[in-house]
Image (tube, rainbow, N blue to C red):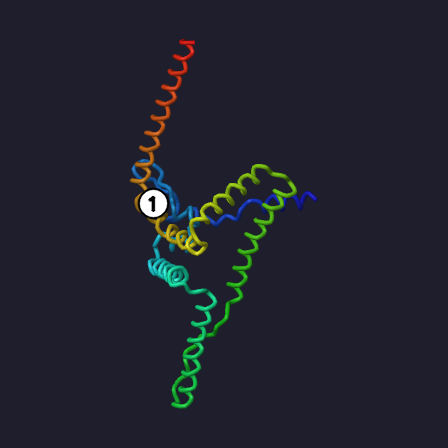
């Protein structure tokens, strides 16, 4: 029983990406202060390189594909089934005619690659999916059986925010906006981190001063009211 409970507790912790503690992705000291490493925060791997535009071809391809998909489904009004069927119909027709003409004219057959998913890729996808599914099930178990109020409130707030945002956008538009923000905000912050941190620090200091001023004025007004009474 104890071992089972330990495993259940471990599943509640969300899966964390592996971080690299060495190399250019680690935190560095610039102008006497520690500079936050966005690359390390994103996992420090190939995904972080793509998000931060260190491999420029991949972000361009992903953004172009996402924009084309969003335009076809949201603006042009295509459905996924009709678009997929038309694309496959055109592809199969071209390959069939190419193969027939190649056999008649003694030409090489179309260079169709071996269409299969490697076992290693399939196992990695299955492992990642099972990790997140087990985490979601563990959260549901904690709420249903353990009665964790804090976790219950966090899930309720998250679902409410998702429902509120979903009332303004379709799911595809929401995903598209998420992709755009994913490829812009981290890269922008990584490039202009010093200026952003400076402006945020000034804004935070200004808000604190305004808050303290408000508290002082409120305290004085309360004291005056008490004296008047």
Residue labelled with disc 1: 189
Q: Position of residue 173 (x, y in %)?
A: 41, 54
**With respect to residue 198, does 185 lie above or below?**
below
Q: Residue 80's spot in the image, x, y percent?
A: 46, 65
Q: Where on the picture, by quarter, is residue 106?
A: bottom left
Image quadrant containing the C terminus = top left
Q: Position of residue 170 (x, y in %)?
A: 44, 54
Q: Alpha-carbon neighbours of circle 1 within 10 Å: few (<14), some, or many (≥20)? A: some
The residue sitting at 70% across, 44% down in the picture is 1
Give the camera-side residue of 86 and 24.
86
- Whether 82 is drawn above or below 137: the answer is below
Relative to 19, 152 lies left or right: right
Residue at disc 1, secondary structure:
helix
Quick check: 217 left or right of 127? left
Identify the residue at image location x=54%, y=56%: 129
In the displayed structure, would residue 223 be above or below residue 104? above
Rendered residue at 42%/51% (across/down): 169
How many marks do you count on the picture? 1
The residue lying toward the viewer, choosing from 93 and 205, is 93
Q: Residue 55 appears in which quarter of the rendering? A: bottom left
Q: Residue furthest right?
A: 1
Position in image of residue 4 (x %, y %): 67, 46
Residue found at x 55% / y 39%: 153
Q: In the rendered image, which quarter is residue 226 located in? A: top left
């Amino acid at each position: 029983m104890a071992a089972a409970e330990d495993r259940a507790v471990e599943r509640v912790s969300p899966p964390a990406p592996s971080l690299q503690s060495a190399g250019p992705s680690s935190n560095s000291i610039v102008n006497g202060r520690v500079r936050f490493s966005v690359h390390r925060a994103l996992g420090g791997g190939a995904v972080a390189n793509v998000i931060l535009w260190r491999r420029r071809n991949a972000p361009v391809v992903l953004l172009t594909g996402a924009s084309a998909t969003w335009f076809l489904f949201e603006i042009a009004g295509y459905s996924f089934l009709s678009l997929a069927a038309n694309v496959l119909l055109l592809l199969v027709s071209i390959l069939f005619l190419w193969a027939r003409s190649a056999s008649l004219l003694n030409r090489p057959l179309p260079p169709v690659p071996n269409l299969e998913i490697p076992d290693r890729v399939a196992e990695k996808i299955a492992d990642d999916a099972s990790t997140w599914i087990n985490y979601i099930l563990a959260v549901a178990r904690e709420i249903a059986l353990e009665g964790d109020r804090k976790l219950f409130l966090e899930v309720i707030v998250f679902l409410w925010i998702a429902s509120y945002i979903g009332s303004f956008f379709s799911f595809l538009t929401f995903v598209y906006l998420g992709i755009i923000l994913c490829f812009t905000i981290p890269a922008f912050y990584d490039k202009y981190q010093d200026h952003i941190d400076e402006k945020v620090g000034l804004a935070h200091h200004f808000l604190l001063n305004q808050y303290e001023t408000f508290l002082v004025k409120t305290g004085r007004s309360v004291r005056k009211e008490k004296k008047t009474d």
